[in-house]
Amino acid sequence: MKRRVVVMVVDGFTDSGLSIALDVFRAANSLARRRGVPPPFTVAVASPDAGPVRAASGLVFEATRTAARIGKADVVLVPGLWVESAAEIDAACARDDVRRLLPVLERAHDRGAIVGASCTGAFLLAEAGLLDGRRCTTAWWLSPHLSARHPSVTLDADLSLVVDERVATTGAVFAQADLALHLVAHFAGPELAQECGQVLLLDRHPLQAGYMAMQHLSASDDRIRRAERWARAHLADDFDIAALARRCGMSPRTFARRLADSVGLSPIAFVRRLRAEVATRLIATTALSLDEVGRRVGYRDADSLRRLLLRETGTTPREIRRRRASEPVRAR
């Protein structure tokens, strides 16, 4: 039985958000044919008015149908929009072409379709009311803004892919691959999904926490940025949250509130994430022993460091060093 997949796009969609989905489903169909079985997917691209839609890169893509006439699709996907600030995603959500997609998404879900979005596409699902009371994820740097804009959403920004019943969301743009492979596994079996990943050289990314940059997240609040700089410089020291709050001129309670608003983390989780970020960089770029890396970020030994990295990034020091592309630079 062929499953009908519709990818809905509007001006400014991320090129890879569309192309990755198309390539994964095309690969799944091709591999199925080689096995002598019918292709499991039919794929169409829809836009508010059909016709040409301009991607973020400026390339023009010709949609094959209007969003309002997608038929009885089994899957409806929304690639993210390319934005560079919270204000830009707010402006995008207010656009007429975007607003016209929302009832289409809602009706598709009510009809029984799986509805998925990559990256900032999660904002469109939230605007359509499909994330109310659900778990989801989005681009990590916009996660605090999604929580502020839609408080009823349960956001798990550490995860690259979150599936809550028939609603699926992913982290940053290239996590579209995780969603597409999940759908291949769901409808056509895990073996075909694994083969697709091997043919296309796609790795699954269960967590996006390892890619989060606290420096980027804290940039929206001057005092939190000050706290981030101070904490980063004193990770090896034994400081408490009260001392960190004083360094940026706030009470611990005010610090916790502003930290939650700007980066979506508690003070303890904030410092823990910083330690993991710096430790990951040191492991990937130096030949320091794990004990020494641990001491530089405030841990006594390598075992404590391993537990930190596994909890915060979902990986191990060995995997981090295995992935580095060049010989380590020895610390002096």
Image (cartoon, rainbow, N blue to C red):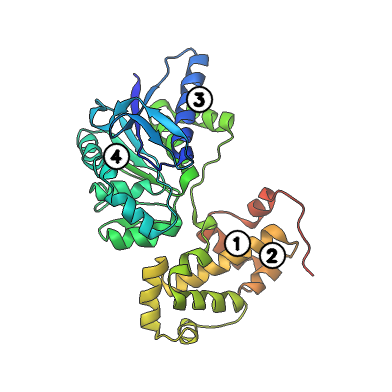
Amino acid type, residue under disc 3 in the picture: Ala
| C-alpha gap between disc 2 and disc 4 | 42 Å
Q: Position of residue 285 (x, y in %)?
A: 71, 59
Amino acid type, residue under disc 1 in the picture: Arg
Amino acid type, residue under disc 2 in the picture: Leu
Mark 2 / mark 3, whichever is N-terminal: 3
Q: Which residue is mark 2?
A: 290
Q: Does the residue at mark 1 contact the one at mark 4 (Cβ under 8 Å)?
A: no
Classify the position of the N terminus by image quarter. Answer: top left
Tag 2 secondary structure: helix
Mark 1 / mark 4, whichever is N-terminal: 4
Q: Which residue is mark 1?
A: 306
| C-alpha gap between disc 3 and disc 1 | 37 Å
Mark 3 / mark 1, whichever is N-terminal: 3
In this picture, residue 84 sits left or right of residue 307: left
Q: Which residue is mark 3?
A: 27
